Structures are given as structure tokens and as C-alpha cells.
Image (tube, rainbow, N blue to C red):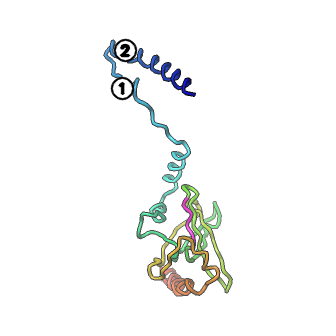
Amino acid sequence: MNALKTVATRLTTKTVRPCINVASKYNYTTAAAVTKVPKINVMEQITQQQIEKSNIDGRRELFSRNNPQGVKPGSIVLVETLNGPGETTSSTFMGVCIAIRRKGIDTNFTLRNIVMRVGVEQRYSLYSPLLKSIKVMQKPNEIKFRRAKLFYLRDQPGKAFQPLQALWKQEQLEKSKK
């Protein structure tokens, strides 16, 4: 293995040196011959381009870990989605954010609410073109949660879902006034 490395280094040094000598003979800069091109991870670059393209209304900043004003598990969130790709009608869902999965362009979040005494969970893809708007109704500071995933709320529904009824009624009143 070491013999292969030494042969490879001899071959590369012999091929690079004549380029430098030729460059110095003709007063060319040697930076082009010596500079290495940094390796670029193509998949990361494509993912970043897709995120920038679909981050229309600041969704990335809303779900960023570094944003203290952003969505955290335990936040009460109102999501308005389009019913189909070509449709203009929309539907709304309000729930407690019980999980955020941050995976680049595949970032998604899960909301849970109790509708007619049945627990309902909805998972939304953050960069989906069907998401019309995301509105944070209440921060988790008022209801203290100390976990990143709040799956235990499936078994303890009373703790987090009481403020949802009042917030939903308040949102409906504001919507009817407009």
C-alpha cells in the first residue's frame, strides 16, 4: 500500500513540476496550476437550492432551531392548506405541535388536536406547495414542555388541548369580522 502511495506521489509531482516551470518561463501565474478545487457535495447543493426556491414566506426561519420566536414542540399552530393542486378552496387545522422532524427539504411537523372526542394527528411537509399559511397562535412558554417529541400527549389529552377551544373560537370571530 505504501509503495502505491509513493509511486502515485512521484507521478503527480513529475507532472506538476513541468507545468510550474513552463508557467515561470512564460510569466504566467502559477495559482491555476497549484490551486485545488474544493469538493462540493452535489446532493446538499441541490437540497439547498430547492429549499431556497420553496421558502417563499420565511418558513425555514419559522422552524429554525436558532430562532427563539419560532415554532417549538408544544406550540399551538394554525395551518391553512389548499385542498388540491388546482383548487382555490382551503381547509384549516389547529393543533398542538407534538413533533418537528428537520431533514432539509423533507422537513415536516406533526399537529395533534381532539375533534369530537377523537384524537386527530396531521403531519405536514414544511415546503409543500399546498401549504397556504402557518400561524403560531400560542408559544409553549405558557404551557411548559420539556421534551422534543410530545408523543406522551396521546395518553394525556387534558394537559395541552384545553386552550385550543378558546383559541379556535377567537380565530373564528376574527375571521368573521374580516
Query: Residue 171 shows which numbered tag?
Result: none
Residue 21's tag is 2
Q: Label 1, on which residue?
A: 31
Amino acid type, mark 1: Ala
Residue 35 left/right relative to 161: left
Main SS, magenta residues: strand
Question: From this viewpoint, which residue is outermost toward the front?
Answer: 2
On-image quarter of the N terminus: top right
Q: Which residues are magenta?
A: 98-102
Please determine whether, in this image, residue 121 is positioned above or below residue 84: below
Between the C-alphas of marks 2 and 1, the distance is 13 Å
Residue 133 coordinates in the image, percent (x, y): 52, 68
Label 2 crowding class (10 Å Cα cut-off): few <14, some 14-19, many 20+? few
Quadrant hosting residue 152: bottom right
Q: Who's the residue at 54% across and 27% down the image? A: 2
Residue 114 image offset from top left, x and y in percent: 63, 82
State which quadrant residue 67 falls in: bottom left
- Dot in front, 2 or 1: 2
Residue 50 or residue 146, whichever sits in front: 146
Which numbered disc flags the more N-terminal residue, 2 or 1? 2
162 is higher (above) or lower (below) than 120? below
Tell me if mark 1 has few (under 14), some (14-19) or many (20+) residues whose alpha carbon lies within 10 angstroms of its own: few
Residue in the picture at 33% in, 22% down: 29
Verify whether residue 63 appears in magenta: no
Question: Is residue 115 depicted above or below 147 in this figure?
Answer: below
- In percent of width and height, residue 173 lies at 50, 85
Horizontal side of 111 relative to 142 (left or right) equals right
Mark 2 residue element: helix
Residue visible at 57% across and 70% down?
Answer: 99
Type of amino acid at the residue the image marks with label 2: Asn
Residue sitting nearer the eye, 172 or 122: 122
